[in-house]
Image: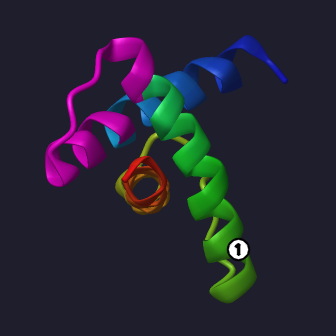
Amino acid sequence: MSPENILVWIIVGGIAGWLSSKLVGTQGGLVTNIIVGILGSFIGGWIFTTTSQTAITGINLTSIGIATIGSLILLAILKLVNR
């Protein structure tokens, strides 16, 4: 994995984590948003590649959308577990 790919994961993860935290209404810092976004990228990427052959391919709206959907799923699961 090249340094450019790692930077793309961090940027897309940060944006997706921030968007999902705003939509769900959770508080989190920059590092938390990046971690949630990166994990959401894995979840969203897995769901979308198995169902529609759409993948995360860089910094674009499709990738951010897929990562945000995955992050929302992750935050929803975490909210259910923490109840």
Image side of residue 22 versus residue 69, left or right: left
* CA neighbours of label 1 inside 10 A, class few (<14), some (14 to 19), many (20+): few
The residue lying furthest to the front in this view is 83
Is the stretch drawn in magenta largely helix, strand or loop? helix
Say how many tags the image has. Answer: 1
Image side of residue 4 versus residue 81, left or right: right
Which residue is more in the foreground, 17 or 48? 17
Residue at x-position 66% and y-position 87% = 51
Residue 52, quarter of the rendered image = bottom right
Residue 61, quarter of the rendered image = bottom left
Image side of residue 38 versus residue 80, left or right: right
Instruction: Find residue 70 and report its horizontal and vertical position in percent.
Output: 49, 59
Q: Tell whether position 27 is magenta.
A: yes
Instruction: Find residue 71 and report its horizontal and vertical position in percent.
Output: 44, 51
For disc 1, the marked residue is: 49
Q: Which residues are magenta?
A: 17-33
Residue at x-position 62% and y-position 58% = 43
Question: In the structure shown, which secondary structural element does the residue marked by tag 1 occupy?
Answer: helix
